[in-house]
Each structure stands twice: as structure tokens, then as C-alpha cells.
Image (tube, rainbow, N blue to C red):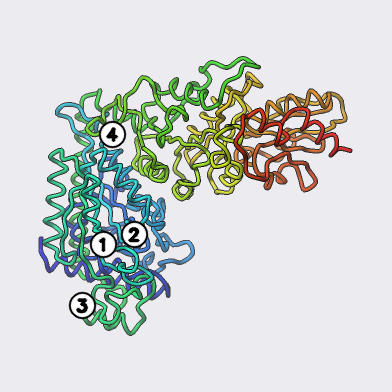
Amino acid sequence: MDANVVLNTANTIKVLTMDAVEAATCGHPGMPMGMSTAAAVLWGEVLKFDPAAPNWPDRDRFVLSAGHGSMLLYSLLHLAGSTELTMDELKRFRQWGARTAGHPEFGEAGGIETTTGPLGQGFANAVGMALAERLMAGRVNDGDTTLIDHFTYAIAGDGCLMEGVANEAASLAGHLGLGKLVVLYDDNGITIDGTTAIAFTEDVPARFRALGWRTETVDGHDAGAVFGALQRARAAGAAGGQEPTLISCKTHIGHGSPAKQDTSDAHGSRLGSAEVAATKRAIGMPESETFTVHPDARAYLEAAAARGAAARRDWESRVMAAPEGVRNALSRQLDTEIPAALFEALPRTAVGKGVATRKASGQVLNALADKLPQLLGGSADLAGSNNTDLDAYEDVARGAFGARARNLRYGVREHAMAAVMNGLSLHGGFRPYGGTFLVFSDYMRGAMRLSAIMHQPVVYVLTHDSVFLGEDGPTHQPVEHAMSLRLIPNLWVVRPADANETIAAWQLALERKTGPTALLLTRQNVPAVDASNDGVLRGGYVLRREEGAAPTVTLIATGSEVALAMATADLLGPGTRVVSLPCWEAFAAQTPDYRKSVIGRGPRVAIEAGRSLGWERWVGEDGLVVGIDRFGASAPAERLASEFGFTPAQVAARVRGWLG
């Protein structure tokens, strides 16, 4: 390693960052400037990557958890030869339509492994990626044939490590022994409000050691010290070490800026033209030029990319030469196609038979497990309640990552579970699912939103979906949650009515490739209302058609209230239509003609044991909504149904009164 070359690369990163932020008139220059040396060493000496093939499966993953410092990542990718992150794109930083958004956005360019910005999320994504590497290796590698062998690196800041989601994920990583995870901690002691001394004075390395990590502390501006720490971390992981590594890099935010180094002003504001010029002068870069690239910088990172390309070609050759069984295992894990015939072959529940949809969900998972090796999941300490266990398979545990290990024990870490699932999905090779009670989706909403932003097809198994879970009371009874989740763009919320609809709900979820799905499932038994469930794939369908030419009313329901709607229709008479609407998002994607044919011509009533706000979309401003607009209560489900007006007789009376 040539220290002068690293210095010139770091200075180039500083210049590109300062000039891009200055051109945009906003941004976060401090972190990229402070971590420029450490990042240059990581990318120039250690990281295994190929910008020409950014998605090859055995590349090292790099996550910029401190996503506000996005110009660090964009600069590195540009200098390494990315054809997507051109100089023009750097000059369009933070502008409409640019690939260089204010925070890294997955899908905008190869090499952006995840969307980051909400602090701590990228850290937890990196844990998921490191876990995926271990699980892929356990399924694909065989004897002398090693096709999966890579590291996951992340850069995290003080803010990331203050966030609870990062601590949850760090605890899980230490517990599982993810020794090929390396985090560079930008320990600069500055946040937006001032120095970290005002709110964050813990011994971070000591905390991580307590969580089962190995730690080192180095001068983050000393290229040799950073390189040595990375070499030791890599050697430990390659030798089978089971401790993730935290390298605490002592750095100066805004490094090189004469007036703003070590100040919170450098965090999220442009330096200003005068200070940019002074900084360029101080670090020996041309003052009168903008977006200057030192020749050493491009040569250094392009050489690293060339080594990565050679490693990728070697990997492709080894794949071709691998035993057929190993190649097949790799192909099976990477296959994203889900045959519809798998679901068609599953047995249906007879109409009238009562089954909790959470139990039906578990039956579907176990029926699919042998046929879909990509399925991997677990629960936040509620597996028995969520029915997420694959009964014929074993737990993922420290040192136990083989093909039989399919059940993840996340512990009481809902937020980390959701963020780790994003990492598993982003890595490739797995279709992750994770379970908890619907009411606890509040704890993981940040990660759920990011899975929707990134179009990641993860599945959230959210059971105990209404006040009818009963005696646990209002703290555990979701009321606003179904409607709240429907507000998240690109998250499909499916609330199946019975065991048969649950089969189709899983089909809908697993066939989706463009975003996450939340399955809202009952604790209580619900009777099967129909032996066919094709309409679920379209989001909604007619269960019972009115008799005669003059419809009296259309009852629209979801989940456990569909059976209630059917019983209410018996009381209201032959002019009543019943519609099951398990997935609003899928239904909204249908043609207007189909939607009209389902909803019908009569006045409309919605029935759902949750907030009524939002149902006007389907019943109209003048429609009736039978919902629950208060918190629940602790009582048996039958008493709650009576108290909240969710018995057939009560609903029928409300409908008759409304119809006048």
C-alpha cells in the first residue's frame, strides 16, 4: 500500500464531496471527509468488487449505514469505474432524476447495496447480509468446492450506534457468531446538536465486546493503521472466527477544513465557497478547479476493481467446474420463480370448518418448505403463536448454518428482525419472512417502510390481528394497525378470511417480486367461507351474489369479519351481496370494470374490526362502516364482539337502520 496514493485518493473524495454539496447548496460533507482515508483503504486494498458486474453473488458487500454521507459512496464508485455514477451524475447531486440522491437509494446504481439514511438501518441490513453469506455457504459449498466466501463491510457513525435497531442487530450478530462482518465506526464525537458528550458518553467498544464482538481502535486518518485492522479482521473471519469485528476509527468530522473541522456545522451544511477554497488549499488540491480528480485516485480504485473483476471471472470458472450437485444447489438458492402449481396442490378446508388463519399459515409454510429452499424465517420470540416454525427443519445457530437450518430465532428484537430480513433479501438467495403480533408492527415500521421503498419481497407474518385476541387487552389488541399499514406505499396488506384464503395470501406474497407483503392473521378459529380462493389473487371477489335485479346492499369485509358478513347476509335477505376484500392494493390494481363487477350497484357497507377511517374509498362518502374507533378491552372474544357490535344480529340491525 502506497500511503501517498491513499492520501491523494482521500483528498479527491474530499474535493468531490465538497464540490457536489456546494453545487447542490445542501448536503452532508463532514462524514465523507472524515472517513475518506479509511474508505479509500477499504476499497483500494480489501474490498472484493467489480463495477462491471455489481451483482455477482460472491462479491463483498459494502453498506454505508451513515447514509447522509452518500457522496463518500458515490465518489468511491465513480473512481472505481462505475458507468452509472459518471461525473455528470456527481455534479447533479441531490437533483431531480439523478442517481446521486441525498441518501443512497438501492436500485439507482450498481454498488448501492441498500437504501440508507434512517440511522442504524444499514447496520442491521449488513447483519442480514452477513447472515445470508453464512447460510448460503452452508447450502452451496461442499468439501473442496467453495463458491460462497465473502465479507460484509459497513461504515456506521455515532448516530447509527445510538439507535436501538443497531444494538438489537449487533446483539444478534454476536450471538450467531457472524465472524465475516466488519464494521468501521466513524468515531468523530460530533452530531447535529453538538458533541456526543451531550448525550452519548458510553464506551462503545466495551459494549460491543459485551455483545460478542472483537474490537480495535485506530486513528482513522492513518492508512496503515486502518489497513492493519482490516487485515486482522479479515484473517479472523477467514479462519472461521465467530466474532464480528468493530473497528473504531477515531476521526475528525470535516477533516481538512480549517474552520469547520470538528464542528457540528460540518455535519449537514455546505462549507461555503470560501471555506471550500481554503480546504483545497490546505490539502494541496487546486483551488480554482471543481470536481478535481487526482490521477492516483482513479488508478488506485480502478486497479482494485480490476482485481475484483479477475476474482469474479475466476469465480465463474469455478462455478462451471464445480460438481453438478454444488451448481444445482447454487441455482436453487438463486432461483426467484415460485411455481403457481405448488399452491394449487395444497389441500383446501371444507366450508364451515373452523381454523385460525395463523395456524393455516403455518400449514402452508410447512407444505412449501421442501419445495422452496429459499424460504427462511422465524419470529420475534413468538414462533409458537405466529406459527412460523418449519417443523422438519432446525434452528439457525452459531456454527449451524447448513441446509437443515431454516428457523431463525430473532428474540424480542422486532425492529432488528425486519431490518435483518431486508438484508437477507438484498443479499439474494432467500425469501425471508418474520412473525410477530400485528400490534407490534409499530416496533418495526421503519424497516417495513424501507423494504417498501427498496421493493424487497419480504413477508411479514402478523398474527393476533384484531381485538378478538381477547383477554390480553388493549395493549395487545390492534385497532389502527391494518389501516396504518395500508398507508405505506408499495406494502401490500392481506387479511385473509379463512384457511383457504390464507393459501392464496401466501401465493400472492411469494409471487410478488416488487415489494413486501404483510399477512394479517387471526388468533381465533374462523369458519371456511369458500373452497375456492382465486379471487384473493385479484384482491377482492364476490362470495355471495344477491338474488333478483334490485340489490339491497353490498357487505364488504376482510379477515374474520367475512364470516360475520355472510351470517349477516342471511339475516338481511336475498338482496344482499357479500364481498371479501383481503388485499386493497391488489384490488386497486385491477381494471375499473372488474372492481365495479365485484362491488356491485347497491349501497355499500364495510365491516372490519379496526379503524373506520379509510373505508370511504370503497363504500363512498355516504357508505356505512362498521368498525372500531376506540381502543379495545380485556375480555373474552365473544363478549368483545357483543360489546363492540360485531354479532350478526347487531350488524344487521345497523344496516337496516342505515338503509331506513
Residue carrying label 3? 283
Looking at the rendered structure, the kind of residue marked 1 is: Asp
Q: Which mark is residue 136?
A: 4
Which of the pair 644/573 is nearer the observer?
A: 644
- Where residue 167 sits: x, y (%)? 33, 50
Q: CA distance from mark 1 to mark 3?
A: 21 Å
Residue 424: quadrant of the picture? top left
- Which corner quadrant holds the C terminus? top right
Residue carrying label 2? 66
Q: Which mark is residue 186?
A: 1
Looking at the rendered structure, the kind of residue marked 3 is: Ile
- Where residue 337 sits: x, y (%)? 43, 30
Looking at the rendered structure, the kind of residue marked 2 is: Ala
- Which corner quadrant holds the N terminus? bottom left
Q: Viewed as shown, does residue 180 lie left or right of 70?
A: left
Q: Farthest right residue?
A: 660
